Image (tube, rainbow, N blue to C red):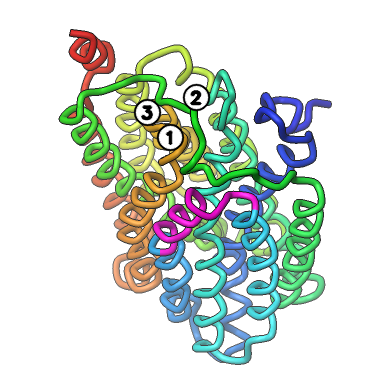
């Protein structure tokens, strides 16, 4: 059996356990942010709310801090050190999750989820640059790391469904929280101390050198596309559990079974990142990302007008393309930015993209309550079309490289 640590080259100088834990950390990051989306119906009943849609806006703080916190996290990662930031990430996520399990009302829940989002913000600008430093094929490494992150989403759907059914929603936060703390302790023991902060290291140069004007254009387009991608990602991953519940109403109503169905979608879709990650190392970004964006539009429209198993098939196709698009931004940063600056650049990009896309979480409940899932999926199709138009503005990489050499 191939493990995540065997599938991707290890960062130079890191023990195998560190490489594995960096990938596990990505899974933990996404899992914890989506436990609430899976358990929200049970939480709503416990807190006395008539409908899950009324409780969903209380989760917006987690996703807002997930974006806004990335900027200071990235800066600290480059200037202070990535090892210590990852230890803070693991332990902080665990403690915050346990605190969420102890909440007694919606506002306490909102505060706990916001704290969880603040610690979750650390991973992407710190863990991903740490994982890809000095590797010869960053696209493949990012693909495996993306697989790990999305398997975390699958675990959130599967494990939360069973824990809610057997023990209760509080266990769905508390048990993974204690596991995260244990991972932090193991990471602290296994990861060698850094001799100097990334900002002071030599080497780690960008693989493709662009002119300043072309670089600005590339990152402006990349950030705009990332905002659209994050809106699609946040709306679907936070809404899919309730979408399936509505689609299979009267046919399948067991939360554990519905969680297992959603987990199947996420597991299959996660492997798209392996394929895309390898393609990124061998072909230009623009055509690959463009066609993946275009293909989302008809699938979302189809999902808007289907039920039962046809919706399951449509949702599988949508999530394959949404998950498959995730490696592009991290791969662009590795290709165009020196390692000394990568955490800060990633933090800036995440702050803009996830800060804006947190609105999807805020609007999800009220939007579905007002217009229904069918019309909401049409809106997502429009966002996917806008993203495709944005990707068309990306500079052509061979032309950009030729311009630099001239």
Q: Is residue 54 visible?
A: yes
Q: Is residue 215 above or below residue 354?
A: above
First reached walking from the N terminus: tag 3 or tag 2:
2
Q: Is residue 32 above or below residue 302?
A: below
Foreground pick, 340 / 161: 340
First reached walking from the N terminus: tag 1 or tag 2:
2
Residue 38 position in % (x across, y down): 60, 64
82 vs 234, left or right, is right
**Residue that carries the numbered disc 2 in the rendered image:** 276
Does dot 3 land on a helix, a strand or a loop? helix
Contact? badges 3 and 1 (CB < 8 Å) = yes
Q: Quadrant of the C terminus?
A: top left
Residue 50 position in % (x across, y down): 50, 86
**Residue that carries the numbered disc 1 in the rendered image:** 325
Residue 336 position in % (x across, y down): 36, 28
Which numbered mark, 3 or 1, is in the foreground of this view? 1
Residue 292, numbered label? 3
Crowd tier of the residue under label 3, counting other residues whose Cα lies within 10 Å: few below 14, some 14–19, many 20 or above: some
At 27% from the left and 37% from the top, the residue drawn is 219
At 48% from the left and 58% from the top, the residue drawn is 73
Is-magenta flag for residue 34? no
Contact? badges 3 and 2 (CB < 8 Å) = yes
347 vs 85, left or right, is left
Distance from the alpha carbon under mark 1 to that under mark 2: 8 Å
Q: Quadrant of residue 173?
A: bottom right
Does dot 1 land on a helix, a strand or a loop? loop
């Amino acid at each position: 059996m191939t493990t995540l640590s065997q599938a991707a080259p290890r960062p130079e100088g890191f023990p195998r356990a560190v490489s594995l834990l960096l990938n596990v950390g990505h899974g933990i990051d996404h899992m914890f942010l989506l436990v609430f989306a899976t358990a929200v119906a049970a939480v709503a009943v416990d807190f006395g709310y008539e409908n899950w849609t009324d409780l969903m806006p209380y989760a917006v703080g987690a996703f807002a801090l997930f974006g806004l916190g990335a900027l200071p996290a990235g800066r600290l990662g480059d200037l202070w050190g990535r090892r210590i930031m990852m230890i803070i990430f693991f332990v902080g996520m665990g403690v915050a999750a346990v605190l969420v399990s102890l909440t007694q009302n919606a506002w306490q829940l909102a505060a706990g989820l916001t704290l969880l989002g603040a610690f979750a913000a650390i991973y992407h600008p710190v863990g991903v640059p740490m994982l890809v430093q000095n590797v010869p094929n960053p696209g493949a490494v990012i693909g495996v790391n993306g697989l790990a992150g999305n398997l975390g989403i699958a675990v959130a759907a599967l494990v939360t469904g069973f824990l809610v059914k057997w023990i209760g929603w509080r266990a769905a936060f508390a048990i993974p929280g204690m596991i995260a703390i244990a991972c932090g302790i193991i990471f602290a023991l296994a990861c060698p101390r850094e001799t100097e902060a990334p900002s002071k290291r030599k080497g780690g140069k960008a693989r493709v050198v662009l002119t300043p004007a072309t670089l600005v254009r590339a990152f402006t387009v990349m950030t705009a596309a990332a905002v659209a991608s994050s809106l699609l990602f946040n709306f679907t991953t936070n809404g899919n559990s309730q979408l399936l519940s509505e689609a299979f109403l009267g046919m399948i109503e067991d939360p554990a079974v519905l969680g297992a169905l959603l987990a199947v979608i996420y597991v299959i879709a996660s492997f798209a990142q392996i394929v895309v990650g390898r393609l990124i190392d061998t072909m230009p970004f623009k055509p690959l990302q463009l066609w993946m964006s275009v293909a989302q539009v008809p699938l979302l429209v189809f999902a808007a007008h289907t039920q039962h198993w046809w919706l399951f098939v449509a949702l599988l196709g949508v999530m394959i393309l949404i998950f498959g698009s995730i490696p592009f931004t991290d791969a662009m940063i590795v290709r165009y930015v020196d390692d000394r600056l990568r955490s800060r650049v990633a933090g800036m990009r995440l702050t803009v993209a996830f800060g804006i896309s947190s609105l999807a979480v805020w609007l999800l409940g009220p939007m579905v309550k007002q217009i229904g899932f069918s019309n909401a999926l049409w809106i997502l199709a429009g966002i996917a079309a806008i993203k495709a138009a944005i990707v068309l503005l990306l500079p052509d990489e061979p032309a950009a490289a030729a311009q630099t050499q001239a």
